[in-house]
Image (cartoon, rainbow, N blue to C red):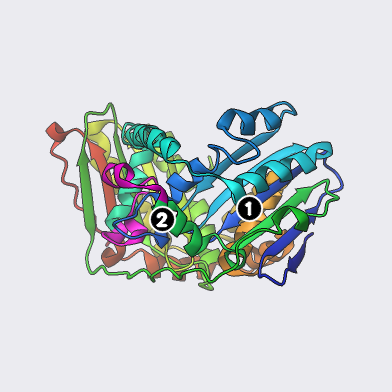
Amino acid sequence: MFQKQILKNGLRIITAPMASTKTAAVLIAVAAGSKYETKQNNGISHFLEHMFFKGTRKRPNTLAISEELDRVGGAYNAFTSEEYTGYWAKVDYKHLDLALDVVSDIFLNSQLEEKKIEREKGVITEEINMYQDMPMHYVGILFNKLLYKNQPAGFMIAGNKENIIKFQRKDFLQYLQNYYVAENTVICLAGNIENNIEKYFKDIKIGRARPKIKVQEKQSKPETLIFHKETDQTHFCLGVRGYSLFHPDKYAMSVLGVLLGGMMSSRLWIAVRERQGLAYYVHTDIENQTDTGYLVTQAGVEHNKAEKAIKLILKEYQRVKDEKISQKELQKVKDCIKGRMMLELESSDSVASFVCIQEILKKEILTPEQVFAKIDKVRPEDIKRVANDIFQNKKLNLAVICPKKLKLQPAISLE
């Protein structure tokens, strides 16, 4: 499915040919994100991502960068997460050279002009305002804050307005020097590809990347964070601390998450939406990072029905602790996970992401078949054991967005 090459400078290049597609995708990932920041520079990873689209020597402004890919109908963007930042483009395979030229240019040669930095501060401030005006999105940010408090893992990826206003060009140059180096970078080509990728990245910087500080997990009782805002619904995230990317039970936790709230026939969808009509959306997500992990259920409900919905979710958490899942239901969940992965991996950009993110986080890439084999090994007793391990009162967390007048103070507890 893929080939991996490590250059003398430490740059990792992965190619994933796909004979059945007429598209090609390139993704550059750097092991740097909000978990690598401090309180003083929180938001710089995301801000830098923005600045890479503001101009190079060859393409002096945003218009010059975007027009080239727009002319061939290309898709392109960038993203910042807690542990990595990515820059990508997807094109008709005949235009792969163009995509590589543009993406490598912005990655290696962005000018980071002071006047453009000042201008972009307004853009990012409005992005932060936008997230705060989206309770369905912002409640997830609050859940992270509740779990990790004043650690980088609890920081908002977009940063805070106070930091955004203070950033100067020298801050970005220092950050580039600390993290945007060959050994900290992975480049992936996927799709209908025939290309010499090395020539585009021969000028990448060489150096040692700074490590991130390991997250400290500290909790001894259920914790709640309530954020007051005038909304038409109460939005909440109810979840527990779980397993990291390297934990042997991460696959069982993934199966557990889909069982609870990862499909329209999941237990929580049926219990909360179909039987009680409490929510339009309710879903359970799993997060596995290099040193943290959690399971969380999110829903938006009528204000006066929030406590009822929370109790229903806790009841389903308790049920999976007490009762062993049937083989039939377990097989349905496994087949759902595998089927979804196969659908996602039909596109070249998804394949690029699938292999590149594994490499940047683990320095190991599993094929879909290897992932499926690990999913297939999960047994009913594994689900019950993992549920009893993570669904404990001392690991419970609830983040809520609701109007102040509601005076919501839900008690969260498992039996």
The percent coordinates of residue 94 (x first, y second) are: 84, 37
Q: Tell whether position 150 is magenta.
A: yes
Tell me the element at label 2. Answer: helix
Which range of residues does the magenta coloring cover?
147-169
Q: Is residue 343 visible?
A: no
| CB under 8 Å between discs 2 and 1 | no
Classed neighbour count for the residue bearing mark 2: other residues with Cα under 10 Å, few (<14), some (14–19), many (≥20): many
**What amino acid is labelled 1 in the image?**
Ile
The percent coordinates of residue 275 (x first, y second) are: 41, 36
The image quarter containing residue 114 is top left
* Marker count (numbered): 2
The image quarter containing residue 378 is bottom right
* Image quadrant in which the C terminus is located: bottom left
Tell me which residue sits at (38%, 49%) in the image: 43
**What amino acid is labelled 2 in the image?**
Ser
Disc sitting over residue 269 in the figure: none
Looking at the image, residue 144 sits to the left or right of residue 29; the answer is left
Looking at the image, residue 85 sits to the left or right of residue 187; the answer is left
The percent coordinates of residue 38 (x first, y second) are: 33, 60
* Image quadrant in which the N terminus is located: bottom right
Q: Which residue is mark 2?
A: 34
Tell me which residue sits at (41%, 60%) in the image: 35
Q: CA distance from mark 2 to mark 1?
A: 17 Å
